[in-house]
Amino acid sequence: MFREKLTTRKNLEALKHEIDLDEHKLSINEVYRRYGTSPAMGLSEERASVILERDGPNDLTPIRRTPEIVRLAKNMFGGFAMLLWIGAVLCFIAHFLELYTLDDPQYDNMYLGIALASVIIITGFFSYHQQAKSSKIMESFKYLVPQQACVVRHGKSRNINPDKIVVGDIVEIQRGNRIPADIRIIRAHGLKVDNSSLTGECEPQVRGIEYTNDDILETRNLAFFGTFAVEGSCIGVVIRTGDKTFIGRIANLTAGIERGHTPIAVEITHFIRIITIIAVVVGVIFCICSLFLGYTYVEAVVFLISIIVAQVPEGLLATVTVCLTLTAQRMARKNCLVKNLEAIETLGSTTVICTDKTGTLTQNQMTVAHMWFDNHIIDSDIDAFHTQSNYIKYSHCWSALARCATLCNTATFTDDPNNLSKPVLQRQCEGDASEIAILKCMEDITGNVSNYRSINSKVCEVQFSSSNRYQLSIHSTDDNDERYLLVMKGAPEKIIKNCSTIYVDGCEIEFNQFWKTQYETAFKELSNHGERVLAFADYRLPLNKYPRGYEFDCDTINFHVNPYFEHFNFPTDGLRFLGLISLIDPPRVNVAEAVQKCRSAGIRLLMITGDHPLTAAAIARYTGIITDQDTTEQLIENVFDNNARSCVIHGSTLKTMNSIQLDNLIKYHQEIVFARTSPQQKLIIVETCQRLGEIVAVTGDGVNDSPALKKADIGIAMGITGSDVSKQASDMILLDDNFASIITGIEQGRIIFDNLKKSICYTLSSKIPELSPFLLYMIFQIPLPLGTIAILCIDLGTDMLPAISLAYERAESDIMKRPPRDAKTEHLATDRLISMSYGQLGMIQAGGGFFVYTIVMAENGFFPSRLFGLRKSWDSRSINDLEDSYGQEWTYEQRKALEDTCHTAFFVTVVIVQWTVLLCCKSRRNSLFRQGMSNHVLNMSIIFETLLAILISYTPYINRGLMMYPLKLHWWFLPLPFTLLVLIYDEWRKWIIRKYPGSIIDQETSY
Amino acid sequence: MGGRVSSFMNALYNPKRKQFLGRDGAGWTKLGVFYFFFYLGLAGFFCAMLAVFMALSPRDRPRYYLEESRMATRSNPLSPGLGFRPQPEADKNLIIIDKNARPNEPNVYAKSLDQYLQIFYWKEDKVEKAESDDEDDDPRERPVPTRKFIINKPGDCTNATQYGFAKGKPCVLVKMNKIVGFKPKPGAPDGEKKSYISICKTNSTAASAVYVHCYGEYPADEDNIGNITYISENGRDTKCGALETSWFPYEGKINREDKYQAPYIWVQFNSPSPNILINVVCRVYGQNIDFDKKTGRAITRFQIYVKDLPQQATSRLNGDI
């Protein structure tokens, strides 16, 4: 395993480079020679097994799963937990010191140590369980492997397990199969592969035997492991298997990437550092004090440890974990599945989102966008259509175009009554993506397509092929016209050559220069929208030449070896031009709005796609990622103009840039679209952003996105269309594939950051009333006002729920209208937060606690004056007759009962003063009256903590166990002046902050 | 690593911006001023609250006493403990008797007893006339007039013999804790009547006192403890010491001053075994006095150690005498 890791490291840089593959350039015979195979015979079984031995099985090395025990250990010993462990160990050290040096050792330090250890272990298991739960959801996305693959061995084709495939094997692939390895195609028949998981292009790509492009993803004669053959069939020779395949390399690259700490982890480290410094400084100061006061060295060390440990926020680890978990659950309900708890906050501090286009911003479904006929461009959005329906109803040209589009189309709805009863847009279809789009559009507008097709029966058809780039069919029509109708559809430049007339406003007129210009304008406009334009034409075949029953010879071309065959026994030119239909993979409904929200939240959006620059730019414009009105050409030129706001950059340009140019590109352009990018380039873009100090979120669904997903501060994968590899690499999964869900995530991330701040402020505020009793006990030698067990009751009992309930607090202002926090200056725990929490809220609480302590003591006979210096006698078992201020004498047992009563009263006081501390922590600037009391969890938590305090104080056995005693009723009311003081002080403070921003109060107390 | 240390030092003190812990001098001053006033206000509030309370609190007896106070809890009935003197050190209950010390050598234990008696029993033997000073006081609520407690025949237990320490027959003062309003009932708790009668049978008829009995805590201590003489207010006894109930109850202070003198007995150990630590437990019997050895109800506990030099040294010293 170690060796493997080492090699991965070494190869990581190599993997970042593009795949080195030249088989597509070689002649097919050279390929055979290279792999020692032949198309007819294939490999021999023996040779295959030798190669299998050499190369290993043809499957991806599974992503090394972190062993469960390591994951558990990470939860047990990471960041915060480590602080608590140190605390626990110190406790045990202090305990043993006491045990061996003091005659009458207290067990407090041991209890504290045990409590700390249990908190860590319980919280560790809890977050481990949470992780395990989300990874269980992950397992439901099972990796799809082809069950069988058909290979030729020894001249016989046979089905074998795909992991047995080796290089040189001849494989046969049928429609619907997953390509079992990277292959060079030998023979193809109408093959189309779905490369979307590799490139993000949603349309199936035509594949054949021709070498068409230097780029391996673009050339026709290669098909890749893990992609689907959606149409046609082929035979190919295997050139790469397993981890050496294109996908395998990406998967390995992904697995090799290691990521830095999440922002929240950085914040927690920062927080721990602050807490530790304060704890050690306070501890050392009082340790030195204690030496001056005449304590022994051992006692001083025990004090030092006790003081340090007393400042460890025991409950905070659990609070943070639960707060994050609650947010994760809330997000899961809004279709964001969070795999890694810490990632929630990352989304809130994200400054740049690198988004994939296909499937994230767009629906990954071709749809008819516009039509051009009668010299008008018509928006084919259904609603727009209905408003224009009258116009359409009476347009001859429209009916001709619609007839042509309906008939010259081989896509069909899946014949299943259940499917047919669905709304048109949701029906399952068979056929090419653009044909399906047209079919759906026609079905929606004109109605029953299949019926129309059956009454206008097809006589003959020429299938679309990548070489002829058109498709035609001949029909007998039902409109009482005896003549056959030839309909044709295809690439505009191809169709236009075959047309001599154009049909406008019901008149067939000559297709002259004017109309050609008109057509050119329309075509340009549509393609500038990034749309794919198809042209339609028809022709009535003269009845005299082509009477009913005429034998049209279409088979010749359909099965002809030469795809450029053009000699039919019917005319294919002199057609009547009908119009254009343009198609696009449209943006999702809410995306534009979501992009707008991102922008107002100060987040930059970069689009990174494998798609064509024109299409990418068009979608970027639709969704508002690019707000510049310049033409796409201009945008592409903007790349080197640092003053331009937006630019579109092609992958090939990107390849030539060095890192400084890249930095400048990203620094100076606000809106960037990266088109035709490779997975490696995606990774480089993310790295560049991170180098510039940005916190980067990456969305993506394809395998090609996964290295970037892994590298990003937060990777967001798509739940429905996302590939397994991308889901593994990501931290968060959008279950509905909707970009708009990210907004929810950002919002929640920001809220949780604010609320964690509040939680920390609240939790820390009870540290002073917990620590100060011990300090006064040490310095003024008073009987201990608050014991360790009571401290634990506060930290792990009454304080927990209120601190957690702050996670439910709504945002104070519109957090989506402010820029993301600056990770360098805006911290989770600042010195001002500590100062506020320790120095102010905490001190008021401590004041309340000592007040109640004094009164409980005095009402039982010990006046404050008597308490000073009493510690030694008070704690001495040898004294059974300690005199109080009224001359009464107390036995050891009686004194300790009184002391425990004081602990109880102090504890209750902290609980009661924490009521208003909690209310104060609800908002950082707003008045409580403005913030409102609508957080019912918080309201309940106040009631709960009070009930818990009552329970602890009054329940028999429980109170004995926790060394608590029932309190007199009026002692419960003693803290109220301090409770009110907190509220009044804090409202005053916030009022000053709002009224005089920048004043000393604002500077020193706003956290 | 070096970078981390230097960055830490930089956080501690940044010489470039003259910042200590991220704040410059002006920053710290501002903070100091803010907190000065804040704590001044808080301390004022605290003191005001406390002053109000102290003004309201009763003067001579606590607001809560007897079962109302924390002396009694649900699991622990109200029951006085006992106290012993001398106890020169707060955290020790060991009494060392050095048999070979010279008689007029100052003895810490005798000094401790002297002090104790001086503090609590110096007052005049007369009825307090303090009522006249304070017209508001209701005479019916006045405590029992203070009397001077005197043991008539203290025997060895006087300052003259260093309370028996010089003779190796130490007297230990044993008293019952003062509890406001508590009046012990003579007798013994239910279920212990029999053992009580067998222990203190000589005094079983006298119903005007509660009795104190001392014994070795463990069998070995019983063997070593030797004879004990109890010197009470009205006589000497070898079984038990008596605390007359007429001294009770304690009624608190009078005008914030201690006037009350609590009864006590002398427990004189006549022949404690030398050079061995003896654990002594003294227990008081009373019908309403609950006994629990573990928590110290109705008892006090101390240790006696009689230091006697080895034989030859002793004889040499004896020769000197």
Image: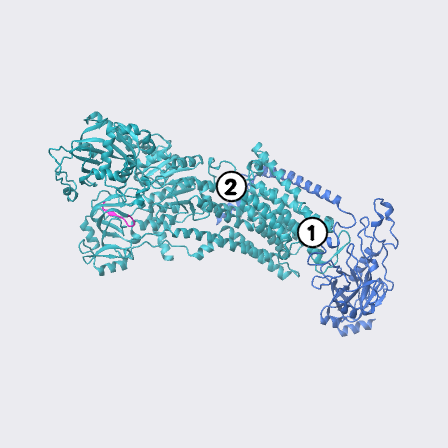
Chain colours: A cyan, B blue
Frontmost residue, A881 versus A268: A881
Quadrant holding the N terminus of chain A: bottom left
User: Residue A117 location in percent, x, y?
Assistant: 54, 56
Residue at numbered disc 2: A754
Name the residue at the right extreme: B126
Question: Secondary structure beneath disc 1?
Answer: loop
Residue B155 as seen in the image, left or right of residue A476: right
Three-letter code for the amino acid on which mark 2 is drawn:
Asp
Q: Is residue B12 visible?
A: no
Three-letter code for the amino acid on which mark 1 is drawn:
Ile
| Chain to which the residue tagged by mark 2 belongs | A
Q: Is residue B136 visible?
A: yes
Frontmost residue, A403 versus A822: A403
User: Residue B128 location in percent, x, y?
Assistant: 87, 51
Query: Does the segment drawn in magenta span residue A591?
Result: no
Label 2 and label 1: CA atoms lie apart by: 40 Å
Frontmost residue, B20 versus A194: A194
User: Label 1 crowding class (10 Å Cα cut-off): few <14, some 14-19, many 20+?
Assistant: many
Residue at numbered disc 1: A782
Quadrant holding the C terminus of chain A: top right
Mark 2 / mark 1, whichever is N-terminal: 2
Could you say which quadrant of the image residue A915 lies in? top right
